[in-house]
Image (cartoon, grey):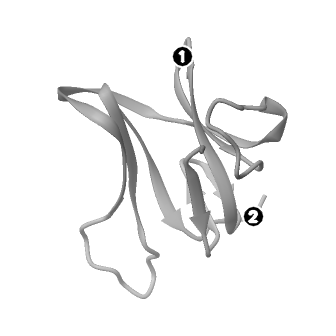
Amino acid sequence: MATQLSTEVDMTIGNAFVPRGVYSLFTLPTRTGWKLVLSREVLQWGTDYDPSKDFVRIDLRQRTLPEPAESLTFWLVPAIEPQTSKTFPHGVLRFAWGNTELSTDWKVGGTRP
C-alpha cells in the first residue's frame, strides 16, 4: 500500500496549505530536485501513481546520509524550542531510504488559499 498521511488538523507542509484529511504520499525526482506529492487518492498501491489525483507537490531538501537507511523510514520531528501562546506546533518532516534523506518543514495551521 502507498504510505499515507492522516491529519486531524489543518497543516502547512513546506509552503503548501494542507486541510485535515488523508493523503497518499509519493516522491518525485525532477531535474531541479525532489518533490513530495500529496495525492487525494488513498488506499492504493504505491506503484499506482496517478498524477491527475495530485493535491499538491512540495519542494524537498536533500542530503546524503553517511550510513544507508535499509528501509524507508519517516520522522515527524517537532521543534525543540518551547511553545508559547503565539506559536503553533511545528518541526521537520524527514524521510530516508538508502543514502538519501529528504525533508521539509511543517506546522499546524496555516492560511487557506
Residue 14 in view (yes/no): yes
The secondary structure type at the circle numbered 2 is loop
Q: Amino acid at mark 2?
A: Arg
The image shows residue 53 at horizontal and vertical percentages of 81, 40
The reply to whether the C-beta atoms of the residues labelled 1 and 2 are less than 8 Å apart is no
Q: Nearer the viewer, residue 14 or 70?
A: 70
Q: Farthest residue toward the top?
A: 31
**81 left or right, relative to 73:** left
**102 left or right, relative to 35:** left
The secondary structure type at the circle numbered 1 is loop
Give the residue pinned by disc 2.
112
The local crowd at label 2, few if under 14, some if 14 to 19, many if 20 or more residues have their Cα within 10 Å, is few
Give the residue pinned by disc 1.
32
**Residue displayed at 25% across by 71% down:** 81
**Residue displayed at 60% across by 64% down:** 6
**Residue displayed at 77% across by 50% down:** 40
The local crowd at label 1, few if under 14, some if 14 to 19, many if 20 or more residues have their Cα within 10 Å, is few
